[in-house]
Every structure is written in structure tokens, then in C-alpha cells.
Amino acid sequence: MKKLTFLSVTAMSVLFASQAFALSDNTMSFQGEVTSETCSVTINGNSAKPLVLLPSVNATALATAGQTAGQATFDIGVSGCTGSTDAATKVSSVFVGNSVSTTGDLSNVATTDAATNVNIQILDTNSTAIDFSSPFVADGDLTVAAGESSASATYTAQYVATGQATAGAVESTMQYSVSYN
């Protein structure tokens, strides 16, 4: 009887411990999608580690919170898609910020000679600022026309001031993917 009680208590402890670990901050999540459509994705023609260079701007152009400067466009393209010959295939860009500010922009994560009070703001294909407080999913921005195998969409990156900017480096990152709807 003691062995049975000991085993029951041990099993319950393991169950409760696994519940605690499942809800902790060190839980890693995985997401994916299985689809009948696939395409190759590029950013400005690069399929790996794309880099978007923003122009240098004077700190005086970012003197007060909300001011923007230094726009740089970038194209997301899909190619090699096996879409339908009869109907368009809806493909959407998906962005997730890696370090997001309280205003929903991409935080400046430069570690050497970093500018202060400056973030990077991304504008969607309609020139509306994207709020990275939650993942951004464009609605069919990369739709592949019937009988076609490629499409592209143009986005914009720009500096945005969170106060009076000081001179220095500005760096940020985001993850991107596409979703087939």
C-alpha cells in the first residue's frame, strides 16, 4: 500500500510539475502551415538574410516624437508558385517584430554608438504604419493571378522619432514569411 501511495504521489508531482513548466516564460512555441501551394520568397531579390539600407538623415529631421524621415522601399516577391490556371491564388505577407517598442514600431537595437529616441517604422502597401504589437498579416498583398507564377508587393521602412533624436546607428529586425489562403 505504501508503494502504491508513493507511486501515486510521485505521478501527481510529475503531472503538476509539467503543468508549471508548460505555463512558464521559457516555453518555446512552434507554428507552421501545410499547404498545397508553395512559392520561393525574396526580399529585394535576396532569398537569404535580406538587408534594407535606410539613407543617412540629420538628427534635426527627427526633432520631435512622431516625425519621420529617410524612407527606403523594399519589395517582397514570390516566384515559382504553382497556382491555379483558373483562379487567383491568395498569398499574404506575414511580419513579426523581434524587438517591438511600446508604440508598435521596431525598436532600435544597435549596440555600438546607437542613436537615441529613434525606431524603425514599416509602412504597408497602402503607406499605413504597421503596428507590431501583434503579428501583421497582409490580406492578399502577394496574390498570384490565374495562370501566373509570381507576384510582388512594395513596403517602406523609415525612421520615426520617439523624442528628440541623437545621432548614431539605428538597427532592427523582423521575421517574415508568407501565408497561402
Image: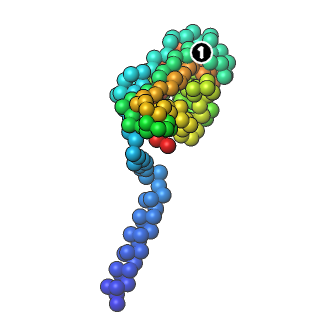
Q: Residue at x 54, y 22 (%)?
A: 156
The answer to which quarter of the image holds residue 58 is: top right
Q: Position of residue 99 (x, y in %)?
A: 50, 34
Would residue 166 be visible to someone looking at this image?
Answer: no
Q: Residue at x 56, y 14 (%)?
A: 70
Q: Is residue 30 above or below residue 97?
A: below
Q: Position of residue 26 (x, y in %)?
A: 43, 51
Q: Residue at x 49, y 43 (%)?
A: 181
Kind of residue indicated by mark 1: Ala
Residue in the foreground of this view, choosing between 164 and 35: 35
Q: Position of residue 96 (x, y in %)?
A: 50, 37
Residue 135 placement, left or right of 11: right
Q: Is residue 111 above or below residue 30?
A: above
* Residue occupied by mark 1: 69
Counting every numbered tag in the picture gives 1
Q: Position of residue 68 (x, y in %)?
A: 62, 18
Q: Is residue 39 above or below residue 17?
A: above
Q: Residue at x 44, y 59 (%)?
A: 22
Residue 124 placement, left or right of 39: right
Would residue 8 be visible to someone looking at this image?
Answer: yes
Residue 73 placement, left or right of 51: right
Q: Secondary structure at mark 1?
A: strand
Direction left: furthest residue: 3
Residue 2 placement, left or right of 165: left
Position of the N terminus, as image quadrant, is: bottom left
